[in-house]
Amino acid sequence: MTHTHRNHSHPDYESLRPQAVALRRAGLSRRQIRDRLHVHNNDILNRLLEGVPAPEWTKRPNAKDDLRDKARELRKQGMTYDQIQVELGCSKSSISLWVRDLPKPERKRTREEASTIAKRGWEATLKRREEERQETKRAAADEIGQLSDRDLFITGVALYWSEGSKSKEHRPSERAIFINSDPDMIRVFLAWLRLLGVGTERLRFHVHIHESADVGEAERFWADLVGVDVSDFSKTTLKKHNPKTVRKNVGEGYQGCLAIRVLQGADLYRRIEGWWYGIVLGAKRPA
């Protein structure tokens, strides 16, 4: 169906709009409204809530305003940019913008003292930035919420098509093999196989790792992760080390890659290929 008005980009827009407005006025957040109405397209959700103010409890205070006021107060007390940066943990470029109309304090310390303060200020800035990064990640994780079976199903198909083995014209092969160095990717892939009803008895595991690494430790790591005994693993594939190559994947955290092969996986591979092209076709269809 072709829609001629942007507000009609969802087939149930006319019925959803009053529901969304009512829920917003009742004090629900965007996420609560999204989950209740099953509208997971942010564009459509924005249109449904257009013109309806957010409830006060969902509004975050403007931290920048608070920092600016504190910075101005500290500047009036005679503090330098470096001192204010140490006190508040914000960048000197921001401080400059906030207090540039205030008088400059007299220099009361040596260059060495100023350098020490500047270093402490930079450390405070790095700490604040790391806290901001972690908060962004936590907020993003909350946006995902609980995965439905369909969510996990589509995620697994995309994951396999990105990282799994694929049949090529020059090398036809309908085998379901997934290999990755990221433990979380392995966990998600195994959860996806369980969703499809593929039991552990149909899985074969083996490690790929550089010969210079601690092979035994890596095998134990992956065996613990997938919940089987090391003796159940197939023979580990050792990669020859090229002395001319400067490798970065070294150290205590290096565990190589784990390959997972599904026995009698030709039918599964064909379905994966079909599911993937179904996703591609679905993405091409107009909203």
Image (spheres, grey):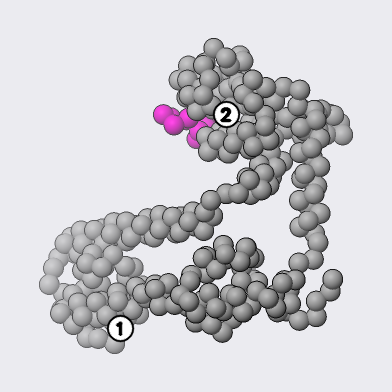
Q: Secondary structure at mark 1?
A: loop
Residue 259 seen by the camera: yes
Quarter of the image where the N terminus is located: bottom right
Q: Nearer the viewer, mark 2 or mark 1?
A: 2
Q: Nearer the viewer, residue 52 or 185?
A: 52
C-alpha distance separating marks 2 and 1: 54 Å
Q: Which residues are magenta?
A: 244-254
Q: Residue at x 55, y 68 (%)?
A: 33
Which is nearer the N-term, disc 2 or disc 1? 1
Residue 109: image x %, image y %?
13, 68
Q: Which mark is residue 100?
A: 1
Q: Nearer the viewer, residue 21 or 163?
A: 21
Is residue 205 rendered to the left or right of residue 173? left
Q: Secondary structure at mark 2?
A: strand
Q: Amino acid at mark 2?
A: Cys
| Residues under numbered marks 2 and 1 in contact, where contact means CB atoms less than 8 Å apart | no
Residue 224: image x %, image y %?
48, 24
The rendered magenta stretch, by its main secondary structure, is classed as loop
Q: Amino acid at mark 1?
A: Arg
Is residue 229 rendered to the left or right of residue 116? right
- Determine which residue is flagged by label 2: 257
Which residue of the protein is positioned furthest toward the top in this rendering?
231
Q: Which mark is residue 39?
A: none
Q: Residue at x 61, y 14 (%)?
A: 235
Residue 115 seen by the camera: no
